[in-house]
Image (spheres, grey):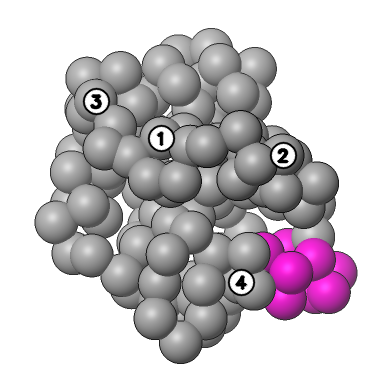
Amino acid sequence: MAAKRILVIDDEEDIREVAQLSLEMVGGWEVLTAGSGSEGIAKAEAELPDAILLDVMMPDMDGPATFAKMQLIKATQQIPVILLTAKVQATDQRRFAELGVAGVIAKPFDPMNLANQVAQVLDWSF
């Protein structure tokens, strides 16, 4: 079976690098990265990853707006999206759940546990 492919969309380069290393080393997955919502949408459409980790707080187009745009594109609307966010209050969690995302992972995340968290949300094994 081919390795799962995950797209990490985050405006912070260090977060993208840590997530990429973590998911590749611990999860054994192929990781693509994008530094903005618009770049992420273009990459998602071109590459069709198995899942997307999407930062909530980004300039220009935030995570929820990026997710909403991906839901309008036939090629990307079935890709499960997990939000990465420092906003972990109950009201934020409810709002994110109402968007229809697969799950939410709190920032800062534990790099050694990130692949486990992703696998748990998506019901993947590795």
**Disc ID at residue 110:** 3
Q: Which residue is mark 4?
A: 66
Disc 4 residue type? Thr
* Residue visible at 34% across and 26% down in the picture: 114
Measure the C-alpha gap from mark 4 to mark 1: 18 Å
Measure the C-alpha gap from mark 4 to mark 3: 24 Å
Q: Position of residue 29 (x, y in %)?
A: 39, 34
Q: Secondary structure at mark 2?
A: helix
| Magenta residues, start to end | 67-76
Which is nearer the eye, 66 or 96?
Answer: 96
Total number of numbered labels?
Answer: 4
**Disc ID at residue 94:** 2
Which is nearer the eye, 20 or 10?
Answer: 10
Q: Position of residue 34 (x, y in %)?
A: 37, 69
Q: Quadrant of the N terminus?
A: top right
* Earlier residue among tags 4 and 1: 4
- The relative height of residue 46 versus residue 120 in the rendered view (above or below) is below
* Earlier residue among tags 4 and 3: 4
